[in-house]
Amino acid sequence: MLGVALPAPAWAAHPALVELRVVFREAGGASCVGAGVAIHLGQGLFLTAGHLVDPGLARREGCPGAALEPERPPVLLLGGRQVPAAVLRRVAGVPTGDAEPGWAYPGWQDLALLRVAVPPAGMAALTPCGVDPAPGAMLRIESLRRGAPAALRALERSGRLGPARIDGTMMVLDGPLLAGESGGPVLGPGGCIAGVISARQGDPAGRLGFAVPAAAIRAFLDRQ
């Protein structure tokens, strides 16, 4: 109906997602906070983007200093509390100048595995897809972002969909990503993890996004 404002659609984050925060300390003593998303895999294990907990690449996420060290363990926001998480495994990044974070990881494995001491009771969990999605498949990008730009808000709250393709070892998303969505899942058919958000190109309404595909995720998790 013309002239009538429609109510905003109901929106809630996927119950398997939590916010991840990391505080880095610069050489001069100043602190810089990085934030992203972590995905619960079950039994207190969480999957996220490796660059979020990589001190060598923290400056690309809004931290001005080049020499950064974690000031304290990463924390996950669980049940309104900040719960420390141990980094069990991550792929070491390779410095590449001003490239997007994911480009700094061999095989595009921009991944880290975290664990909390006490598994969250009753929390939903996600698992990687058994196979990578076919080129052009429609996928759902899950987000914790509530304050999206107006042009993206309705799309985000309804669960953004976008065709995707696999180029070698990376997933290319033909749709916009937002700052702070790193580590979040790209969900395939049946709600499995088809990808983990790693980087975006351009402004919030930009051309492409990049994610770690399911095959790379499975290889990372299967490593002893």
Image: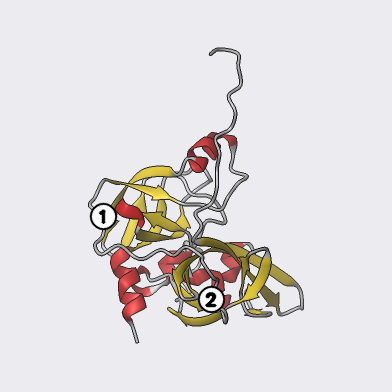
Q: Residue at x 31, y 53 (%)?
A: 190
- Report the front residue among 116 and 103: 116
The reply to whether residue 64 is visible in this rendering is no
Q: Tell me where residue 110 appears, x and y as whole percent.
A: 43, 70
Q: Tell me where residue 129 appears, x and y as whole percent.
A: 30, 62
The reply to whether residue 177 is visible in this rendering is yes
Residue at the limit of the structure toward the front, as seen here = 122
Q: Element type at marker 1?
A: loop
Q: Tell me where residue 84 appears, x and y as whole percent.
A: 63, 77
Instruction: Using a 10 Å C-alpha cutoff, classify the residue at mark 2 as few (fewer than 14 neighbours), some (14 to 19) or many (20 or more).
Output: few
Residue at the limit of the structure toward the top, as seen here = 2
In the image, is 36 to the left or to the right of 126? right
Q: Which mark is residue 1?
A: none
Q: Tell me where residue 112 appears, x and y as whole percent.
A: 46, 74
Q: Residue at x 37, y 54 (%)?
A: 187
2 or 1: tag closer to the N-terminus: 2
Q: Is residue 70 above or below residue 122?
A: below
Residue type (three-letter) at the residue carrying disc 1:
Pro
Instruction: Using a 10 Å C-alpha cutoff, classify the residue at mark 1 as few (fewer than 14 neighbours), some (14 to 19) or many (20 or more).
Output: many
Q: Element type at marker 2?
A: loop
- Report the front residue among 210 and 8: 8
Q: Which mark is residue 133?
A: 1
On the image, numbered disc 2 is attached to which residue? Answer: 119
In the image, is 197 to the left or to the right of 68? left
